[in-house]
Amino acid sequence: MPTTGTLPRRKLGQALSHLQRTSSVTVSEAAEQADLSPSYVSRILAGDRIPTWPVAHTLATIFGGRPAELRTLWEAAQGIAHPSRQTVDGAAQRLHAALRGLYLAAACPDLHALAQSTGLTPHEVRGVLDGEHIPDWATTSVLISRLAAQPATLRGR
């Protein structure tokens, strides 16, 4: 994701907002559980504010999500860059986490719709999102685009 700016903050907000909408937890209930104001939680969900990692982690947990899926989005929103040299396993984990975060930010679109024009089957798309498969960059770029993100912003993460 790009360094600081609107897009990463919005993507993080969209992912948290999707988790909130699919949970049975209202914004007010989440705010109370997290000891935050409802207006602050609303601004986070709208992508207007970037929470600290403990707040993002807490909200993801309250909404029944997996915080690790949001970590890359949060880091991008904070402008945190990682070294260009990473282990293969570390880079693969970061890619999968970023893809899962983008999938949440896109409100978990249908796998059949995502598979269109990627050259992957819906089962293979699920494998990519679950961290079981790493497609080539061309296929990954198409998948990122189908998740309403810019492939160039994810490359090198």
Image: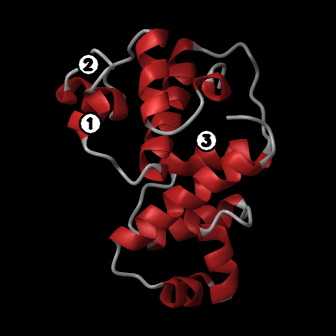
Q: Which residue in the structure is indicated by mark 1?
A: 113
Which residue carries the number 3 mark?
Answer: 72
- For label 3, the crowd category at 10 Å Cα-Cα, with few meaning under 14, some 14 to 19 and many 20 or more, is many
**Looking at the picture, which amino acid does disc 2 mark?**
Leu
Q: Which quarter shows the C terminus? A: top right
Give the residue type at disc 1. Ala
| Mark 2 closeness class: few <14, some 14–19, many ≥20 residues within 10 Å | some
Residue 131 tag number: none
Residue 120 numbered tag: 2
The disc, 1 or 2, on the residue closer to the chain's N-terminal end is 1
At 63% from the left and 20% from the top, the residue drawn is 155
The mark lying in front, picked from 1 and 2, is 1
| Cα–Cα span, label 2 and label 3 | 24 Å
Q: Is residue 145 left or right of residue 112?
A: right
Q: CA distance from mark 1 to mark 2?
A: 11 Å
Residue at image position (50%, 56%) is: 15
Q: Amino acid at mark 3?
A: Thr
Residue 55, located in which quarter of the rendered image? bottom right
Question: x, y percentage for residue 60?
Answer: 50, 64
Name the residue located 31 percent from the left edge and 33 percent from the top edge: 114
- Please name whichever residue, 95 or 42, is drawn nearer the observer in this view of the structure: 42
Percent from the top left, x then y, of residue 48?
72, 66
